[in-house]
Image (spheres, rainbow, N blue to C red):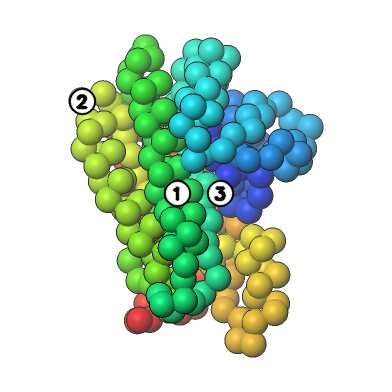
Amino acid sequence: MPSIAITGAGSGIGRATARCFIKAGWRVALIGRREPPLRDTAAGQAALVLPCDVTDAASVDAVFDRMAQEWGRLDVLFNNAGRGAAPVTPDLMSPEEFRAVIDVNVTGMFLCARAAFRVMRAQDPQGGRIINNGSISAHVPRAGSIAYTASKHAVTGMTRSLSLDGRPFDIACGQIDIGNAGTELLTQVSRQAANPEPLMDVSVVADAVLHMATLPHGANVQFMTVMATNMPYIGRG
């Protein structure tokens, strides 16, 4: 039975993806800051619930060690945890808020990738797959999103570096760039917007991650963009 760790599993894309993998018969580790939302994600199904702050290196190492002990190996990490910030021009963004976004979206993603890489390199047979949650903002920013956009451009660089560094150890890394998935939060924001953008069902993202995770050995989706067809992405700027 293959195994996957999913960060940010307490809501949104992480929750939908976790439920998709549980349904598909995978062993799933649910990683997030608070235990109750992780329990809600599991919904009574067998899953490893691992409360963890992804910005805390010791905590991250501990939960990945726990997975290795419980399962003997880790096949996939969906590096999904992230956060945004209220839209503002750069002069109105505080340094503290900028650092907070970078801490989760870049440092947190690095710490989880680092821990997964360590486990995958040491296991027998060696190897595994890391899937990073990028964003359409890794390519084309929205106005007022300097911290989030900078963080997601950094994720793309991390994906490329992980792909290269993982080759000798049979560790593949790919990135999924998502546009307007209809999570509970984004759906609520859309309802309040004067000009709401098109959304796609969040299950589409979960299915895409499952596809990336189940490719045959030796194949990898390096970058995938999945988006609501009519959202303002192509040609925006």
- Residue 18 in the image: x percent, y percent? 61, 40
Q: Nearer the viewer, mark 1 or mark 2?
A: 1
Q: Whole-percent x and y of residue 88? A: 49, 77
Counting residues from the N terminus, which is met first, the one under dot 3 or under dot 1? 1
Quarter-of-image position of residue 32: top right
Q: CA distance from mark 1 to mark 2?
A: 29 Å
Residue underneath mark 2: 168
Q: Does residue 23 appear to the left or right of 215 in the view shown?
A: right
Question: Crowding at label 3, few (<14), some or many (≥20) Cα neighbours within 10 Å?
Answer: some
User: Could you say whether the residue bearing mark 1 is in a helix, strand or loop?
Assistant: helix
Q: Residue at x 59, y 34 (%)?
A: 52
Q: Residue furthest bottom?
A: 194
> Disc 1 marks which amino acid?
Asp
User: Height in image: 37 above or below 100?
Assistant: above
Query: Disc 3 versus disc 1: distance between alpha carbons?
Result: 25 Å
Mark 3 or 1: in front is 1
Q: Which mark is nearer the camera, 3 or 2?
A: 2
Residue 114: x and y, percent? 37, 31
Residue annotated with mark 1: 103
Tell me what residue is drawn at x 26 percent, y 39 percent: 163
